[in-house]
Image (cartoon, rainbow, N blue to C red):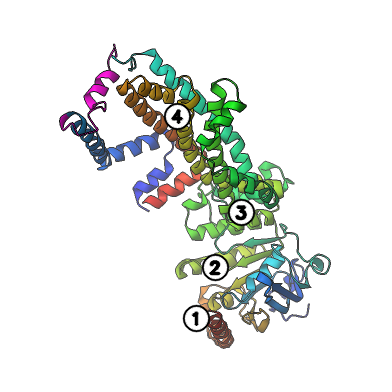
Amino acid sequence: MSTVMNTDTSSQKSAIKGAIRIEDVVKVYDPDGAAVMAVDHCSIDIPGGEICMIVGPSGCGKTTLLNAIAGFHGITSGEIYLDDELLCGPGKMQAEPGSDRIVVFQNGALFPWKSNLENVVFGPMMEGKLSKKEIYDKALSMMADAGLSGTENSFPGEVSSGLRRRVEIVRALMNDPKVLLFDEPYRALDSLTKSVMHEALLDIYYKNKVTIFFITHDLEEAIFLGHRLIIMSSRPCKPKKVVEVDIPHPRDYSVLTSPRFRELMEEAKGVVHEEAKKAFEAGEKEG
Amino acid sequence: MNTESLQASEMTGMALTMYRISTWIKSPKPYLMFMGFGLMLGLWYFTVEVWKLPRFEDMPGLTEVVTEYFSADPMYGTSIYTPEYYMHIGISLRRIAYAFFLATALGVPLGLFLGWSKKFREFIFPLFELLRPIPVLAWVPLAIIMFSGSETPVIFLTFLASFFATTLNTMLGVESIDESYSRAARCLGANGWQTFRHVIVPGAMPYVFTGLQISIGVAWFSLVAGEMVSGQYGLGYLINTGYIMITYPTIVIGMITLGVTGYVTSALVRMAGDFMMQWRVRELALGDN
């Protein structure tokens, strides 16, 4: 792995699975015969256990990349590997969705007709490898760990949106995934709830080291959570600049006021602003 | 969230029903409701019996109908004391039950598959859409030719309207399910069949029950049409004979009975829906407050 990593976790990281290698991926949409390039020769190398923040303006094609990794749709050319195993590439342009890569959706996708606990046990119950008792015991202890005791028998519609997101992450972790794919999960939350969610997510991450592929357009969120920011150009989507966040983990909210945080913000802001402007102008032309 | 809504969300069954009734009585709703009924009955009474408006003079009046309805020895042969009255209700209810059960048992699975499988939809849906707009009355001759006796044609006609409503709403229900739910299920390791069972079926339920509400409504509609044309016994038959035999109060008794039985059956379907979709009831209870 060629990527420069943070000194504090590099030794543990090499042992963690879930390395994603995106190689020269192109995705062209073809609505009504007019080819639209969503992703343009994109290569990203994410070592196992890294929190990689994909930052870019709305509608730039970040989600296309996430959907390709998750297996929701195919790519036009290029390859994507998970731990050197081909997910999609020549001969198999669409990956098979699987419980080693679990998506946490933008608007949340807890099943509203199942209680929180039934949601959490869903993955292992479908797989059917463990006994029902083992699964429920594991679910209860993981929910307790994530501060979700007492919400087990409520339906998702009955708890706050912040708690819902936490249930969703626990549901994903129940399957022992190698990678969690976040598609702007905190977009709809207010900033206070968001800050609580960020700390909760890091807390969960420190306990269960997984690779995190996190899409966002919120720079503060990106720098606070990520080992690394990959700032994408607006359509077609392509890495434009990589910002290494050299603030050591574990982090808490005091990081936000540190001088290094502000320096990184400045560094990233210029690039992001430029891309957002381009996306805006492109959108105006189309409109 | 205030304490009242919290209570409502935690209560179930009998306690919840009692709580709802007590808040209902304390609200202006029941009094407005009685005012509405009063207005309707008043209008009836005055137009027919007091003002005797032209064209209204032959109509059965309020007092005449009420007297007939509750008379132990009814002048025109039908009241709450005559066994024939209950036989008509019973026969209509039985036909509704058969037709509604059949329409649900066939319509819900068909709708689920129509919504789920694109290929299946392309195969069946155009045909379905061509048959659906044909009014039930247009089916009457074929129904009589196709089925023997007087019972099966009526049940068939009743079934037909219900079936289309149920199937269409169930299909819309499947289409309404947010794609993220099926994607999440696939991510979590569910196979196609598991996704169908755990996501598609429960996700479509709210629409299915909307469909069943419509279905039970149109079932009564087609039942009466069927009974008027080709039935023996039943409330539609009662009304039609009332017209032919010039026993007008019987017509109104039949109509009121249809209103009540129709309302009760709708309420039963709604209750079944609430019972099966606790998650939705609780969500809505929170949303109201």
Instruction: Work out whether disc 1 and disc 3 sit on a shared chain.
Output: yes
Instruction: Identify the subunit bearing mark 2.
Output: A
Query: Real-space Cα distance between discs 3 and 4?
Result: 58 Å
Q: Is residue A160 above or below residue B79?
A: below
Residue B131 drawn at (x, y percent): 59, 42
Label 2 crowd bin: few (<14), some (14–19), many (20+), radius 10 Å: some
Query: Real-space Cα distance between discs 2 and 1?
Result: 15 Å
Query: Real-space Cα distance between discs 4 and 1?
Result: 75 Å
- Give SS at disc 1: helix
The three-letter amino acid code for the residue at tag 2 is Glu
Residue A263 drawn at (x, y percent): 56, 87
Q: Are marks 2 and 4 in contact (CB under 8 Å)?
A: no
Q: Is residue B59 magenta?
A: yes
Q: Which residue is mark 4?
A: B224
Residue A257: assigned label: 1
Q: Which residue is mark 2?
A: A199
Q: Residue at x 32, y 26 (%)?
A: B252
Label 3 crowd bin: few (<14), some (14–19), many (20+), radius 10 Å: many
- Give SS at disc 4: helix
- Residue depth check, mark 4 versus mark 1: number of the one nearer the observer: 4
Query: Real-space Cα distance between discs 2 and 4?
Result: 64 Å
Q: Which residue is mark 3?
A: A142
Q: Main secondary structure of the magenta part?
A: loop
Q: Are marks 3 and 2 in contact (CB under 8 Å)?
A: no
